[in-house]
Image (spheres, rainbow, N blue to C red):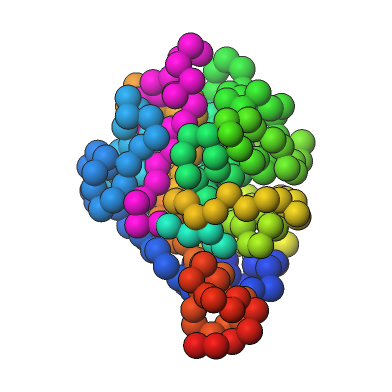
Amino acid sequence: MLTLLMISGMATAASWVETFDYPDYPATTYMAGVDGWSSGYSADEWYANEYYVASATDDNVDDDPDAKNNWFTNSAIDAQDMYLSGWMTTQDNDTMGFVFNLQDEDNYFAVVAIGSIDAPGASGGESNPYGLGTMVGLIEVRDGEPTLLDSVSRRVRGETTVYVQAGQNDGFVWAMLWESSTDDASDVDWADPDWDLDEDGVASLGRGTAGMYAYDAGGLSGDSWTWFGGLTVYQHDDDDDGVVDDDDNCEFEANP
């Protein structure tokens, strides 16, 4: 039901085909190697507890750039014209978000939210792994260089649920986010996002994977949890012929 509600608020015109869905996680399990999941930074494991997954140890340091790449992706996701849907929440002032069209640590898109300094339990300054200001931002990383495609200055609040849709289609990169004080999706107005980010005319990054992203977040080591729910990924089918654009020899004319 949640996925259907989220789709109804989507702003893009293309049709879509669901190609990946992982609604629930194993109970109390470290996720590296489970069901195709892996972490971009092996020193910082991801931990599952049935309804959510979270970065476990907050193991990042300023002189280790790999610590900034703590995403959690699945090898079954391989798409170009795609979008994802999911939710996230943080206790602290951590950076959280989603990556998509991720080819390697130097080439991907991301939508990230910098947690608020006045969040319950927050300490220190806001975490800014990309060197950006305090904001919600849509980011392109190409050849290792981050570019801010679009942003808003308003910050997310700590301990709120943020529902996210984000993706790329034919050079249009976008993200929409909704903030809720509860985890009840029925309270969210899917037609009116709190943050609406996009950029057109962006060169495609090609096929890649997708997943969650956390920085300065580690509940097992510092009681600073950042949680993510299940993940669903769709591939676009512009001519609605049942063949996704990535595999269609005639993308805009139906020829099943």
In the image, residue 36 lies in the stretch drawn in magenta: no
Q: Position of residue 130 (x, y in %)?
A: 62, 27
Report the residue at 55% width, 88% height from top.
Answer: 255
* Residue furthest bottom as drawn: 255
In the image, residue 60 lies in the stretch drawn in magenta: yes
Of 31 and 234, the residue lying toward us: 234
Give the vertical position of 16 relative to 136 (above or below). below
Q: Is residue 111 visible?
A: yes
Report the residue at 59% width, 79% height from top.
Answer: 250
Q: Position of residue 238 (x, y in %)?
A: 62, 76
Report the residue at 61% width, 57% height from top.
Answer: 168
Of 118 and 76, the residue lying toward us: 76
User: What residue span does the magenta drawing correspond to?
Assistant: 56-77
* Residue furthest top as drawn: 63
Report the residue at 55% width, 71% height from top.
Answer: 245
Q: Position of residue 186 (x, y in %)?
A: 56, 66
Give the vertical position of 12 relative to 67 (above or below). below
Q: Position of residue 183 (x, y in %)?
A: 50, 54
Horizontal arrangement in the rendering, residue 53 relative to residue 30 (left or right): right
Horizontal arrangement in the rendering, residue 11 relative to residue 141 (left or right): right
